[in-house]
Image (tube, rainbow, N blue to C red):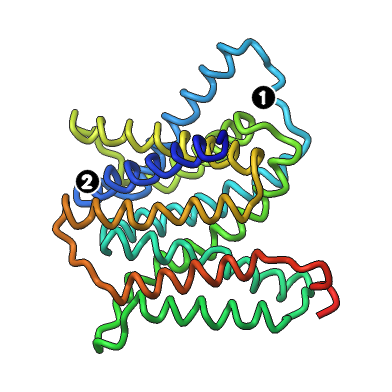
Amino acid sequence: MNALMWMSGALFSFCFMAIAARELSSGMNTFEVLFARAVIGLTLVSLIIYRTKDMSYFRTQRIKFHLGRDLTHLMGQYGWFVGVGLLPLSQVFALEFTAPLWTSILAMTFLGEMLSFRRFFALVLGFSGVYLIVDPGEGIFNYNSLYVIAAALLFSIGNTFSKSLVKTDRPLTILFYMSLIQLPVAFCLAFQHLILPSLVQLGWLLVIGLTSMASHFCMSKAMQKTDLSIVVTLDFFRLPLITVVGVLIYAEAFRWVMVVGALMVFGANLINLYQPKDDSKT
């Protein structure tokens, strides 16, 4: 029940963050949005830690892991925010779910993991689903999809660091270092684009800052409370939720072929997560 509660918080946070990103996409540079997000996040997390009066939240013995996670996550967030401004929201979320597939490929490439029949089938199924999601069969390949596909690849790298970090560092510590590391990098990238946001833009930036922190915190807590396969399954409910948002708020077209593709990616992720006892021998 606790995992369901934390995942519900993550789902709604991701959806509200996508809405805010879409609203800001036409008036603010993406790097500026990421900088504001880091400022808000660092301020919020620091205040929460200060209120706990537990200064051990500021300490970590794994700064290299934080650097790896947070820099790849920042680059992935750039691709995701750009994609939200250019693509249907449902397509962005569907492509984002390819991150576990990229994780599998990276594990085989750099860690020497074996390509079993199960893993091969999952990859074929998953990337066949991606083919349907980007829908090149209509003769129009939207190259903006590559922003989100690249983001998913970077998120997969960041998730590898996250899975290790949650074993030793608490969620607030992970969030603190994420904002601390990303803030100066985002500032340097955003410097030449900085403008004074309007009140409406400031409101949407606050939404992004708050939901970004909430989504990461809720996901970290859910990973601590239950099995990763359950987290992945519950996380998939983001897709129907954001599809409804896209159709009702932004009048985006509903495409069954995209739904089929997304279900194929989801099925591939579940197959990839399944670990039979003798899998190491295959």
Please report the residue visible at 40 percent of the width from the left and 81 percent of the height from the top: 131
**Would you call the spot at circle 1 few (<14 residues within 10 Å), some (14-19), or many (20 or more)?**
some
Q: Badges 2 and 1: C-beta atoms under 8 Å apart?
A: no
Residue 142 position, x and y percent, is 29, 76
Please report the residue visible at 37 percent of the width from the left and 74 percent of the height from the top: 260
Q: Earlier along the polypeptide chain: callout 2 or callout 1?
A: 2
Q: Which residue is mark 1?
A: 58
Q: Is residue 184 visible?
A: no
Q: Nearer the viewer, residue 194 or 134?
A: 134
Drawn side of residue 41 relative to residue 30, left or right: right
Q: Nearer the viewer, residue 193 or 98?
A: 98
Residue 190 versus residue 45 in the image, above or below: below
Q: Quadrant of the N terminus?
A: top right
Residue 160 position, x and y percent, is 66, 55
Q: Which residue is mark 2?
A: 23
Q: Check the image and name the residue furthest to the left.
A: 251
Under circle 1, the secondary element is helix
Task: Identify the amino acid type marked 1.
Answer: Phe
Q: Quadrant of the C terminus?
A: bottom right
Residue 17 versus residue 52 in the image, above or below: below
Q: Quadrant of residue 176?
A: top right
Q: Nearer the viewer, residue 173 or 253?
A: 253
